[in-house]
C-alpha cells in the first residue's frame, strides 16, 4: 500500500526540523563553517564561517522516504545513488572544514567518483529492469539504443550533480531552483504509474522546504557539496527510472544555463583571452552587474519554476491526448 505523498513530505519536513538546527548549533559551538572562495564576489566574504553540511538532511530525508516507500525494490537503487553522491560531497566538505580553506577533493577526483557511482547505478537499474532505454517524449515513446541510453544516463547523473553544485552560489538559489524541478519529475513518474520511487523524492522535498527556510538570505546554513551532489543525483535518478531522461534538461533548464555559462566562459577565455561574463556561473554575472543577491535568486527561481511547469504541462497534455487517441 502506498503511503500518501503528504505524509512522506511531512516526515521529510520533520527530519529537517530535527537535523538542521542541530547542525547549525553544533558548528557554531565548534566555530567551524563554510570557507568562501577567494576569487568569488567580494560581497561573499561576509558568508565566511556560515555553518555548512546542510545536505546531510537530504540524505536523511531520502532514507525516510525509502523506509516509507511501497516498493523498496524500485526505490533502493535511487536511494543508494543519493547516498553515494552525498557521501562524495560530504568527503569534499569535510576536507574543506579540516583544511580551513575552500579546497576539498580535486575536480578530477570528484568527477571520477561520480562517474563510477553513476556507472554502477545505470548497470544496476538496467539489469534489474528498474529502468531502460524506452523513453517518454511529448505524446510518444521510443526506444534508444542501449549503449546510447547508458551514456546519456551516466552523463545525466554526473551532469546534474555538478550543475546543481555550480548553481549553489547564492543564498536559497540551489534549493529554491531544485524544488520545481523535483516536483516536475515526481509528477512525471506518478502519471506513468511509477510510484515506487517517488517516496524518496517526497521525503527530500519536505526536507528542501525546511532547508530553504534556513538557507534563505541571509543564510544560516549552506547545503555544501553533500547537498548539491545528492540533489542532482536524485533528479537524474528519478528521470532515469521514470523513462523521462530526455525531459530532464527541459525541467532543469536553469541548471543547464548555469552550466553552459561556465563552459562558454572557459572556452572563450582559452581561445580569445576574453571573458563573456563578468563572472561565471551566470548568477555571479548579474551580481557584479549591480543586482541585489535576493533579486538574482528570486529571478532564477521564478525562471526555474516556469521552465519546469511549462515542460510538465506540455508533456502531460500531449501524453494525455495521445492516450485518448489510442
Image (tube, rainbow, N blue to C red):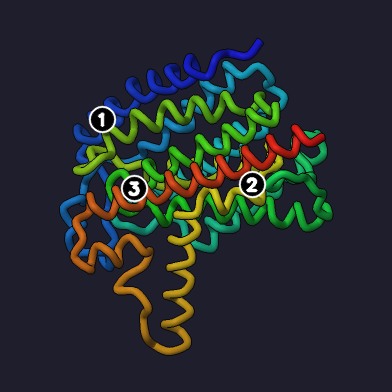
* Mark sitting earlier along the chain (3/1): 1
Label 2: which secondary element = helix
Residue 94 seen in render:
no
Taking the image as shown, residue 22 lies to the left or right of residue 94, namely left
* Mark sitting earlier along the chain (3/2): 2
Residue at numbered disc 3: 173
Q: Which of 268 and 77 is in front in this view?
A: 268
Residue 277, above or below 98: below
Which quadrant of the structure image shows residue 287?
bottom left
C-alpha distance separating marks 3 and 1: 24 Å
Residue 6, above or below 209: above
Residue at the image point whose x is 45% and y is 30% from the top:
205
Which quadrant of the structure image shows residue 101?
bottom left
Classed neighbour count for the residue bearing mark 1: other residues with Cα under 10 Å, few (<14), some (14–19), many (≥20): few
Q: Nearer the viewer, residue 265 or 228?
A: 265
Residue at numbered disc 2: 117
Residue extending farthest bottom? 272
Residue at the image point whose x is 66% and y is 42% from the top:
318
Please provide percent x and percent y for residue 242: 68, 37
Disc assigned to residue 26: 1
Classed neighbour count for the residue bearing mark 2: other residues with Cα under 10 Å, few (<14), some (14–19), many (≥20): many
Amino acid at each position: 500500500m502506498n503511503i500518501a505523498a503528504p505524509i512522506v513530505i511531512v516526515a521529510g519536513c520533520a527530519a529537517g526540523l530535527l537535523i538542521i538546527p542541530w547542525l547549525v548549533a553544533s558548528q557554531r559551538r565548534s566555530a567551524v563553517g563554510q570557507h568562501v572562495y577567494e576569487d568569488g564576489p567580494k560581497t561573499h566574504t561576509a558568508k565566511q564561517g556560515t555553518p555548512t553540511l546542510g545536505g546531510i538532511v537530504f540524505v536523511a530525508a531520502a532514507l525516510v522516504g525509502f523506509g516509507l516507500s511501497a516498493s523498496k525494490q524500485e526505490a533502493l537503487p535511487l536511494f543508494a545513488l543519493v547516498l553515494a553522491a552525498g557521501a562524495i560531497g560530504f568527503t569534499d566538505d569535510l576536507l574543506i572544514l579540516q583544511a580551513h580553506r575552500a579546497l576539498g577533493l580535486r575536480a578530477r577526483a570528484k568527477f571520477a567518483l561520480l562517474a563510477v557511482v553513476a556507472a554502477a547505478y545505470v548497470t544496476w537499474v538496467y539489469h534489474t529492469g528498474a529502468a531502460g532505454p524506452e523513453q517518454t517524449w511529448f505524446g510518444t515513446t521510443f526506444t534508444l539504443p542501449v549503449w546510447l541510453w547508458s551514456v546519456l544516463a551516466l552523463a545525466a547523473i554526473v551532469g546534474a550533480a555538478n550543475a546543481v553544485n555550480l548553481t549553489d552560489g547564492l543564498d536559497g538559489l540551489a534549493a529554491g531552483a531544485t524544488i520545481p524541478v523535483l516536483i516536475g519529475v515526481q509528477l512525471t513518474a506518478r502519471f506513468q504509474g511509477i510510484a515506487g520511487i517517488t517516496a524518496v523524492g517526497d521525503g527530500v522535498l519536505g526536507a528542501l522546504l525546511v532547508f530553504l527556510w534556513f538557507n534563505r538570505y541571509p543564510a544560516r546554513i549552506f547545503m555544501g557539496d553533500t547537498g548539491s551532489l545528492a540533489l542532482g543525483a536524485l533528479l537524474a535518478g528519478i528521470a532515469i527510472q521514470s523513462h523521462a531522461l530526455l525531459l530532464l534538461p527541459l525541467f532543469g533548464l536553469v541548471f543547464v544555463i548555469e552550466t553552459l555559462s561556465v563552459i562558454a566562459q572557459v572556452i572563450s577565455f582559452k581561445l580569445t583571452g576574453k571573458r563573456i561574463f563578468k563572472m561565471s556561473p551566470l548568477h555571479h554575472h548579474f551580481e557584479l552587474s549591480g543586482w541585489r543577491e535576493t533579486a538574482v535568486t528570486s529571478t532564477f527561481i521564478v525562471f526555474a519554476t516556469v521552465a519546469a511547469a511549462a515542460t510538465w504541462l506540455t508533456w502531460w497534455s500531449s501524453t494525455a491526448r495521445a492516450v485518448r487517441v489510442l
